[in-house]
């Protein structure tokens, strides 16, 4: 494919010629880095990851296997993505609660954890220091100010839960059965959703 280069540091990785990779970066096989991607030092990118145009990650960011990062997303220090996370175009991660241009707060960066299988919609904003649960679904444009439970569907500003999503990315009805693959879920006594085994 035109514009791709081979970098001996990263066998089996598709790298566009406009991408820039700092020293001390790890990238798993099968990953694709497209136009103007910039990976900063001490960043680990897993296998079979796709990073779209103008994505920046690092320093000291971890991206799990199978993640898809759409165009114009910056993963700042403290952001950790588990496996198979989807980040929609131009979604925003922050790294400090109260930024000021004249005040250096690099020592105050907070960790943001996005658990396995979660989806973050286009233009959503994720406040630093929170955890987005497994297979949660953040609607486009949502502003997430607190932790999101596993499987929760949240929308709005501030984001609030309006339902539940299956692992297959389908909204669950009252019966809590996924319309795509018939997997069944149940609510626990403390109001959380879990997959029923078997």
Image (spheres, grey):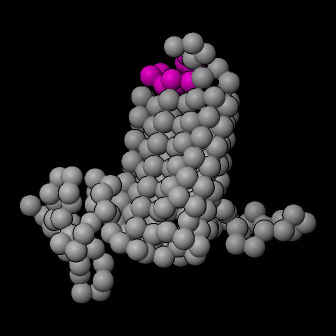
Q: Residue furthest right?
A: 102
Over which residues does the magenta segment extend? 6-15
Q: Residue furthest top?
A: 2
Identify the residue at horizontal 28%, vertical 53% (top origin). 168
Residue 165, position in %: x, y? 32, 63
Residue 57, position in %: x, y? 62, 45
Q: Residue furthest left?
A: 198
Q: Is residue 163 above or below residue 21?
A: below
Location of the C terminus by quadrant is bottom left
Side of 132 where 77 appears, left or right:
right
- Find residue 107 and report its image quarter: bottom right
Asked if one can make out residue 108 in the rendered structure from this viewpoint, the answer is yes
Side of 135 where 2 appears, left or right:
right
- Find residue 158 and report its image quarter: bottom right
- Which secondary structure dominates the residues rendered in magenta? loop
Identify the residue at horizontal 23%, vertical 81% (top origin). 188
Identify the residue at horizontal 64%, vertical 43% (top origin). 72
Residue 195, position in %: x, y? 21, 66
**Numbered-mark total:** 0
- Find residue 123 and report its image quarter: bottom right
Q: Nearer the viewer, residue 15 or 78?
A: 15
Asked if one can make out residue 43 in the rendered structure from this viewpoint, the answer is no
Residue 152 counted in the magenta span = no
Side of 191 where 140 appears, left or right:
right
Residue 14 counted in the magenta span = yes
Q: Nearer the viewer, residue 99 or 159?
A: 159
Residue 174, position in %: x, y? 22, 74
Q: Is residue 169 above or below residue 30?
A: below
């Amino acid at each position: 494919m035109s514009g791709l280069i081979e970098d001996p540091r990263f066998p089996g990785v598709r790298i566009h010629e406009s991408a820039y990779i700092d020293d001390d970066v790890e990238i798993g096989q099968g990953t694709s880095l497209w136009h103007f991607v910039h990976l900063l030092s001490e960043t680990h990118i897993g296998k079979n990851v796709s990073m779209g145009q103008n994505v920046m990650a690092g320093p000291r960011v971890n991206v799990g296997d199978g993640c898809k990062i759409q165009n114009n997303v910056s993963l700042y220090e403290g952001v950790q993505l588990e496996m198979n996370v989807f980040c929609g175009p131009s979604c925003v991660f922050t790294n400090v609660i109260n930024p000021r241009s004249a005040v250096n707060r690099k020592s105050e960066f907070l960790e943001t954890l996005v658990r396995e299988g979660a989806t973050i919609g286009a233009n959503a904003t994720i406040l630093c220091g929170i955890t987005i649960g497994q297979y949660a679904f953040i609607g486009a444009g949502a502003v997430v100010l607190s932790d999101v439970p596993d499987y929760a569907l949240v929308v709005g500003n501030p984001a609030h839960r309006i339902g539940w999503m299956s692992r297959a990315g389908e909204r669950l009805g009252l019966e809590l059965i996924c319309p795509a693959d018939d997997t069944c879920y149940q609510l626990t006594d403390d109001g959380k959703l879990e997959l029923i085994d078997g």
